[in-house]
Image: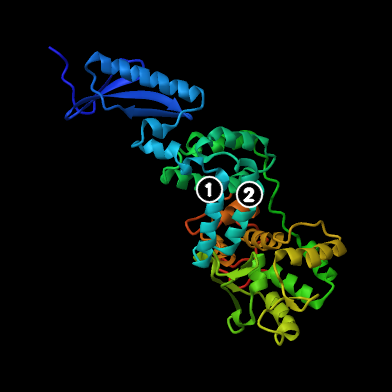
Amino acid sequence: MGTERKPGDSWAVARNVLARQFKKGAILEICFEYRGVRCREPLKLTPTPASNIRYAERTLAEIETAIERQTFRYGDYFPDSKRAKLFGNIAAQRTVKQLLKDYLALCEKAVTKDNMSESTLVGYRKIIDNVLIPEFGSHRAIDFSATHIKSWVRKQDVTAKRVRNVLSPLRQVLAEALNDGEIERDPFDKLDLSALLAKTAKASEYEVDPFDAAERVKILEACRTDQERNLYEFWFETGLRTGELIALRWHHIDWVHKIARVETNFTAGVEKAPKTKAGVRDVELSDEAIAALIRQKSLTSLAGDHIFLNPRTDRPWEGDAPLRRTSWDHTCKLAGVRRRNPYQIRHTWGSRMVSAGYNLFWIAEQMGHETIEMVIQHYGKWMPGEGKKVKLDKHGNPMQRTEQASAPATYLPRKTPT
């Protein structure tokens, strides 16, 4: 008595020739590999008579020969197959460059609809035009594989973060191509990027390197103009991001409650609201910050609404690069202070607050972080207490304090420490 077949069952009848059972009967399928993809296509033939199986074998041999000679055209044999679209039409000939250019066009539309920041678009454009297209653009998307990505990653002498940033738009492009049926599989699915980066990526050279009290004094004394001194003193007392500092307006200052309202960030030549809700916040101002504002008010309050202006042009700063080149670098040199990126001013404020034992949630709130994880990651080694690790209570406060900590017992400061 023969074996009863159920719909969906399949069995081999010859090399790479299968019979597959359907409700109305069984049909033959042939299996072959094309462009690295395992293909299985049905023939309009039943497993019997035996001549049908021989025909399937001849068709398979013909296809394999055409593939070897690079003359195989999928649509000629299987015009109704989904893979005919994948392998046989114009879309299958599209290059990675074309996919990336189309993606940039979508990003530009997203910016006009306020669904993407201008700075993100600028970053993607630089990566795509300067790295991804020169490296991968000539490959057909259908031929692009994890091997191409691995080869590029192994040649890099940059940090893992840089590699991930570069590959981010490529990952999105390929995921979209997979959804659209332009590629059979996503190369990133075959790539263990974390393991690869652990072996090849360069360790990050960036570290939190704050200025100590003596360096801060030297920097302020070396300022060539009153405007520069006011800017840096206010910056050291608030820890704002660079874009938040140069976007700050006089109407953002609450003189009664000694608060600066941060609601805009200048980046990539455009003023935008902060990326996260935590970025919009009220920053408490110390007496020193208020004093710097009072001095600055006589210099710029009649020139417009921006608090801090470029003293060389008397116009608002046009970004962090001009501030660094025309002011910060010269000031550090005159002060005899080891030069660091001006963003270390923000880290200086954060490390000071942590070392003074202030509430970590308050510090995160003042700095515009959504959680205290970033505070702990960057400034954990400045937490007061003995040993390398400091335990926190349920409120996020260090359970041990040094005698030098100047924060009140509740760890809920209203003013920054001196």
Q: Is residue 177 left or right of residue 208?
A: left
**Dot 1 lies on which element?**
helix
Query: Who's the residue at 58% across and 59% down the image?
Result: 121
Q: Which residue lies furthest to the left in this view?
A: 1
Which quadrant is the N terminus positioned in? top left
Question: How many residues crowd around disc 2 within 10 Å: few (fewer than 14), some, or many (20 or more)?
Answer: few
Question: How many residues crowd around disc 1 within 10 Å: few (fewer than 14), some, or many (20 or more)?
Answer: some
Could you tell which of marks 1 and 2 lies nearer the N-terminus? 1
Q: Quadrant of residue 95?
A: top right
> Mark 2 and mark 1 in contact (Cβ < 8 Å)?
no
Q: Give the labeled residue for mark 1.
A: 99
Q: Which of marks 1 and 2 is in front?
A: 1
Q: In this view, does 219 lie to the left or right of 256?
A: right
Q: Which colour scheme is used?
A: rainbow
Q: Give the labeled residue for mark 2.
A: 386
Whether residue 320 is situated above or below residue 387 in the rendered picture: below
Could you say which is closer to the camera, residue 348 or residue 265?
265
Disc 1 marks a residue whose amino acid type is Leu
Q: Which residue lies furthest to the top in this view?
A: 1
Q: Quadrant of residue 59?
A: top left
**Dot 2 lies on which element?**
loop
Query: Who's the residue at 85% across and 72% down the image?
Result: 224
Whether residue 31 is situated above or below residue 211 in the rendered picture: above
Q: In which quarter of the image is residue 314?
A: bottom right
Q: Is residue 184 visible?
A: no
Query: Who's the residue at 33% across and 37% down the image?
Result: 80
Disc 2 marks a residue whose amino acid type is Glu
* Residue 218 spot, x, y in % from top left: 83, 66
Whether residue 415 is situated above or below residue 163 in the rendered picture: below
Could you say which is closer to the camera, residue 196 or residue 220?
196
Q: Can residue 9 be seen in this view?
A: yes
